[in-house]
Amino acid sequence: MNESTLPLARRAALLGAAGAATLAALPGAAQANGVPPQRGPMPPRFHRLKVGDVEVTTLLDGAMQGTNANIQNFFPDSTPAEIAPLRERAFAIEAGLHQPVGAYLLNTGRNLALIDCGGHSSFIPTTGQTLAALRASGYTPEQVDTVLLTHIHPEHALGLSYDGTTRNFPNAEVVVTQIDHQFWTDPAMESRVPQGQRFIEAARRAIRPYPGRIRTVEMRQGLEVIPGVFLEPAPGHTPGHVSFRVTSQNQSILIWGDIAHQMVIQLARPRWRVGVDVDSAMGVESRVRTLTMLAEERILMGGVHVPWPGFGRIIRDGEGFLYVPRPAQFA
């Protein structure tokens, strides 16, 4: 018996079931109670603004989540009694220390450059969205001609290559300080890495597919690494850790790597050491110097772990500082 010979009521029931199945599969289809289904994970995210003639686009790579047990290791100078009001001040609801991970795309008109390039889920499961965000923003990895690394930590550099073989940015030159490159590639330096062999292997995996495409530079104040982008030394977190100042038409933005991971805590207590810094005393010096400069010059800033959408300014607040986010603007 084929469909055309079925009783009319039976045929209507079959057609109704098929139609319902098709409707349920359509975007925006309602559930049985009339409420549309939940949408699940967020799509790739980006946000952009202009600094003079330079288009700066933040790309959200993901986030990092620590545990409560790790807070004391991360901030060895802190006590639970001191940490609690700072977390409450930020309305922190996550267990442990949570921070976003991002990257910054610069279209200067002469270069399409990335400052850092995110991580990968093989190292931190909640990272690895930079390539998707880059494409969503209207660009492709093949168009990126330069990747400027603040340092070679996994959530800043693993976006270069997920497997240690494939270049995710096949036409890019990678720029990093000679000091940081040596720190992560010289076996004699391995004992100085606080995070151990796992971080060392990740750093080497990230840069391995770029032989002949890595330009190591002197860690020198004001060094112009590409036209309009200048190096700002910030050693301590790693020996060759830097920030980058982008300048155009008398406007500037400073983009840092890991001057601060926790904006509320570290800006309120900028002289607290960080347990994952290679040289924690030097890290404090770099943090205080950078925050002081930003507060005095009142220029725009961004950073890999700065709350989304990743732009703001720094102002003084007693013995510490405050982060004032720049709200998303579309004109």
Image (cartoon, grey):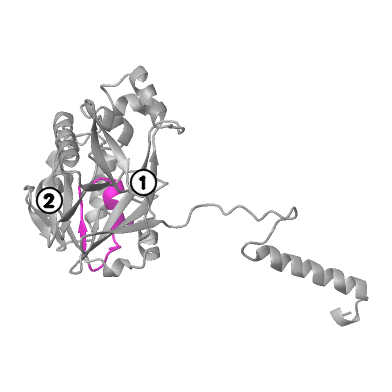
Residue annotated with mark 2? 231
Q: Which quarter shows the N terminus? A: bottom right
Q: Which residues are magenta?
A: 146-171
Is residue 45 at all visible to an observer of this figure?
yes
Mark 2 neighbour density, 10 Å: few (under 14) some (14–19) many (20 or more): many
Give above or below for 7 relative to 105. Answer: below
Under mark 1, the amino acid is Phe
Give above or below for 196 relative to 35. Answer: above
- The residue located at (43%, 31%) in the rendering is 91
Sequence-first tag of 2 and 1: 1
Q: Which mark is residue 123?
A: 1
As rendered, which of 102 and 246 lies closer to the eye?
Answer: 246
- Secondary structure mainly formed by the magenta segment: loop
Q: Residue 177's x, y, as percent?
A: 12, 50
As rendered, which of 322 and 135 lies closer to the eye?
Answer: 322
Give above or below for 223 relative to 24. Answer: above
